[in-house]
């Protein structure tokens, strides 16, 4: 097309004779003339931003470039050998990354298909990147659709890339140097660039939302795990906090009313017939065809839920220089972090230490770690004060007149652990207080006091000051065994539960040929429990689960019920059975397992187990 015919065609389009031009092209031409003062006959060379400015654009888009680069490379490989160029432009229209045939680099640069070119509409006129930024949608600007006559040999198909909050953040462009005349020839190019933009958005959401629930969904089950249509991120309270553009377009149709265009900030139940409690049932532990989810308007999709990837501290993250025996007791919990540093400092001196905390919380492990930090080659002696009567305990501690050596003497120069010290009889407490007076220990049979540098560590699950107030524990002994107190947190209060689960599972199965792992549903169930038995209860639970698992994957049904619970599960279930069977309750609750569990008064995991045992499946 000549320059004159091109300007005449633009004039006719601006006068209302669109000449088969898409409306966005006509509107873009009008802006180029009226708003930007551009001349289609000027044929200006492509504008390359200065190097310093390009660096600024690339730095601002650094995260997206790193995430999108593999997608750009894959797209370029799909069209390799066909003279296509792949461009990634930011919201100002500047190319911040590209893939093209290096053999034609000079030609590409002259055509503007290169790094650092400004393709915004007010600089380059009507073009793929500029039109995409202006319309917010995928477009093909083909040959004479371009405003600048210099670009009329190009065909540019562009698709927007949106960030996780729904804002347009970049443009992916697939351009052809010399395209065939029919615009329809670029339909495949437009499809490819749309699909690539969708995958980049998904990769971006997956990278930024690792610590939240991610729900991917698709109408085609075979594409669910490899190329889903849409994805959202959901926080622990069930609110949507991140989306892909595909998710926005789908969910807008699911919620009629004046707020139909608002997705982020709303609850999962506002769009789906499920809650955050149901997400563990949509993990790959179930066959894809069984993971059917419904929108509130009745539309059906297949869902794939990905559990949060809890942040697990690396060994060095706990504290640089922390001794290995103490370092192995925490996976990064803040309270344990402070406790272990305090324990390290206390291990150096001879002062007595009281370790308090609920039963099963790991007090004995901390005592052993303090000893190994202080003097690993020295004696380590433990006596359980609750296991023996008063006479037997005194004989064990102080020895006998017959010359039998006592545990206090055996621990000389090392560590003496008084386990369950709160259970010690008062008479024994009195004698021990005398022996420990002024940090001197009297060995049985000796006539003089001998200073023995023994570290005394006492362990209790009781409130010793409260026992002192009741007269059940001697105040003078308390001051001698508790120069300082370390409080072990309960398991439910720790923030490194995932680390503990993985570590204990690895330790408990180290002698087995298989490596075991938990499904996200089973892991979430462990997070929901109160753990009155603390780490000891967790160990028992994992041991039973390993024994019950059919393979090396531990699922919900493999977890034993909690030994202690808030209510009587059997009675509650029986009451529900009198009112109607499980299927009827689920139907009443809209097949929402969490609501059904609350109605029955049982754990959600119990409902899942009974559904499996009775062969009950959600309809549809």
Image (cartoon, rainbow, N blue to C red):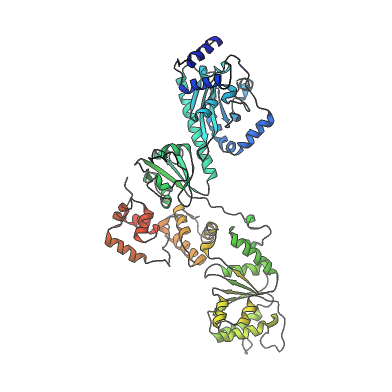
Quadrant location of residue 370? bottom right
Quadrant location of residue 63? top right
Kindly tell me whether residue 358 is visible in this rendering. yes
Q: Left or right: where does residue 619 sit relative to residue 59?
A: left
Q: How many marks?
A: 0
> Residue 285: x percent and y percent?
42, 50
Quadrant location of residue 149? top right
Query: Height in image: 298 above or below 403?
Result: above
Q: Left or right: where does residue 579 sit relative to residue 501?
A: left
Query: Height in image: 16 above or below 348?
Result: above
Residue depicted at 65% across the width and 85% down the height: 434
Q: Left or right: where does residue 24 sit relative to residue 333?
A: left
Query: Height in image: 496 above or below 72?
Result: below
Q: Nearer the viewer, residue 9 or 206?
A: 9
> Residue 185: x percent and y percent?
46, 21
> Residue 554: x percent and y percent?
45, 56
Question: What quarter of the picture does the C terminus occupy?
Answer: top left
Q: Nearer the viewer, residue 551 or 12?
A: 12
Residue depicted at 67% across the width and 69% down the height: 346
Kindly tell me whether residue 229 is visible in this rendering. no
> Residue 440: x percent and y percent?
70, 82
């Amino acid at each position: 097309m000549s320059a004159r015919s091109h300007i005449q065609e633009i004039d006719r389009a601006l006068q209302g004779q669109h000449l088969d031009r898409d409306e966005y092209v006509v509107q873009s031409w009008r802006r180029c003339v009226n708003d930007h003062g551009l001349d289609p006959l000027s044929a200006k060379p492509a504008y390359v931003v200065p190097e310093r400015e390009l660096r600024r654009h690339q730095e601002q888009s650094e995260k997206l470039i790193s995430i999108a680069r593999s997608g750009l490379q894959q797209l370029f490989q799909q069209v390799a050998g066909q003279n296509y160029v792949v461009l990634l432009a930011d919201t100002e229209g500047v190319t911040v990354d590209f893939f093209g045939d290096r053999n034609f680099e000079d030609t590409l640069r002259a055509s503007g298909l290169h790094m650092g070119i400004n393709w915004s509409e007010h600089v380059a006129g009507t073009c793929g990147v500029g039109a995409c930024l202006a319309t917010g949608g995928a477009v093909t600007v083909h040959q004479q659709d371009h405003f600048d006559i210099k670009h009329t040999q190009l065909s540019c198909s562009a698709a927007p890339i949106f960030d996780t909050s729904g804002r347009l953040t970049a443009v992916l462009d697939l351009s052809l140097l010399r395209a065939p005349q029919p615009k329809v020839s670029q339909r495949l190019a437009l499809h490819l660039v749309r699909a690539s933009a969708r995958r980049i958005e998904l990769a971006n959401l997956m990278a930024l939302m690792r610590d939240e629930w991610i729900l991917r969904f698709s109408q085609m089950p075979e594409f669910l795990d490899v190329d889903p249509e849409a994805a959202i991120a959901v926080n622990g309270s069930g609110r949507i906090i991140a989306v892909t553009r595909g998710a926005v377009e789908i969910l807008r149709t699911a919620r009629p009313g004046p707020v139909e265009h608002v997705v982020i900030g709303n609850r999962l139940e506002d769009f789906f017939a499920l809650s955050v409690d149901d997400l563990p049932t949509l993990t790959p532990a179930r066959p894809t065809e069984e993971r059917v989810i419904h929108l509130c308007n009745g539309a059906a999709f297949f869902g794939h839920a990905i559990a949060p990837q809890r942040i697990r501290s690396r060994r060095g993250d706990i504290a640089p220089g922390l001794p290995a025996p103490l370092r192995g007791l925490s996976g990064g919990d803040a309270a344990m972090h402070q406790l272990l540093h305090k324990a390290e400092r206390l291990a150096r001196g001879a002062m007595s230490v009281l370790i308090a905390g609920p039963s099963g919380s790991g007090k004995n492990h901390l005592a052993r770690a303090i000893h190994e930090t202080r003097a690993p080659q020295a004696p380590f002696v433990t006596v359980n004060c609750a296991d023996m009567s008063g006479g037997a305990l005194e004989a064990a501690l102080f020895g006998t007149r017959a010359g039998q050596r006592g545990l206090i003497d055996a621990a000389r120069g090392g560590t003496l652990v008084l386990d369950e010290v709160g259970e010690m009889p008062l008479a024994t407490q009195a004698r021990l207080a005398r022996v420990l007076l002024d940090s001197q220990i009297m060995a049985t049979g000796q006539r003089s006091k001998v200073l023995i540098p023994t570290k005394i560590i006492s362990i209790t699950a009781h409130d010793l000051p409260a026992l002192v107030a009741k007269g059940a524990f001697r105040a003078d002994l308390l001051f001698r065994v508790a120069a300082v107190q370390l409080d072990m947190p309960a398991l439910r209060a720790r923030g490194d539960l995932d680390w503990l689960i993985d570590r204990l599972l690895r330790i408990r199965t180290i002698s087995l040929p298989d490596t075991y792992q938990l499904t996200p549903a089973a892991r979430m169930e462990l997070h929901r429990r109160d753990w009155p038995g603390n780490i000891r209860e967790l160990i028992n639970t994992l041991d039973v689960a390993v024994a019950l698992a059919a393979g090396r994957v531990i699922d919900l049904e493999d977890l034993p019920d909690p030994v202690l619970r808030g209510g009587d599960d059997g009675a509650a279930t029986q009451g529900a059975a009198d009112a109607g069977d499980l299927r009827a309750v689920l139907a009443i609750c809209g097949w929402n397992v969490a609501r059904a569990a609350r109605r029955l008064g049982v754990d959600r995991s119990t409902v899942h187990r009974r559904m499996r045992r009775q062969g009950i499946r959600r309809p549809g």
